[in-house]
Amino acid sequence: MGKSVVNNETVFLNETIAASGSATSQSVSIDPSEGFFNLYVEMTGDGTCKLEAAIKLGDSEFLVPVDHDDIVTAHVKTSGAGSDGKDFYSFTIGLAESVKIVATETGGVNGVVIEKAILGWQ
């Protein structure tokens, strides 16, 4: 039996997001894919970050579908098993050819730095 390949792409690297600000990753081609994804996040700063997936199919614009849940609504510097701002989030998306990750600081007082975010899929 063949070995499965896990695709991954770094979508953010040392991305500073001001209080109430947002950042959008580059487009990642996912060769029409529907299904399960993981997002690894390393974050510092005193703010709170929401992460969402914006998808594109054909000639459409990138949109965050209204029926999709956020990847995470409140990632903070103490998130994760080690309380160190590092965690994995599993999520699904509908049929799409490309995806962008949208990160928004939702606390409104302090910014965040996404040290690293890696999107993974199979």
Image (cartoon, rainbow, N blue to C red):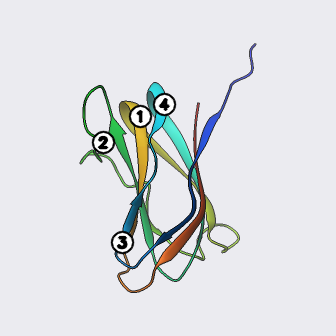
Q: Residues within 10 Å of mark 1 (few under 14, many from 20)?
A: some
Query: Type of residue at label 3?
Result: Gly
Q: CA distance from mark 4 to mark 1?
A: 5 Å
Q: Residues within 10 Å of mark 2 (few under 14, many from 20)?
A: some
Q: Is residue 5 above or below residue 107?
A: above
Label 4–label 1 contact, CB within 8 A? yes
Q: Residue at x 68, y 27 (%)?
A: 5
Q: Residue at x 50, y 37 (%)?
A: 36
Q: Which mark is residue 23?
A: none
Label 2–label 1 contact, CB within 8 A? yes
Q: Residue at x 74, y 15 (%)?
A: 2
Residue linked to disc 4: 30
Query: Type of residue at label 2?
Result: Phe
Residue linked to disc 3: 21
Dot placed on the residue nearer the N-terminal end, 3 or 2: 3
- The image shows residue 111 at horizontal and vertical percentages of 46, 79
Dot placed on the residue nearer the N-terminal end, 4 or 3: 3
Nearest the viewer among 33 and 114 is 114
Q: Is residue 14 above or below residue 117?
A: below
Residue linked to disc 2: 62
Q: Residues within 10 Å of mark 3 (few under 14, many from 20)?
A: some
Nearest the viewer among 72 and 111 is 111
Q: CA distance from mark 3 to mark 2?
A: 19 Å
Query: Type of residue at label 1?
Result: Ser
Q: CA distance from mark 4 to mark 3?
A: 27 Å
Residue linked to disc 1: 98
- The image shows residue 119 at horizontal and vertical percentages of 56, 45
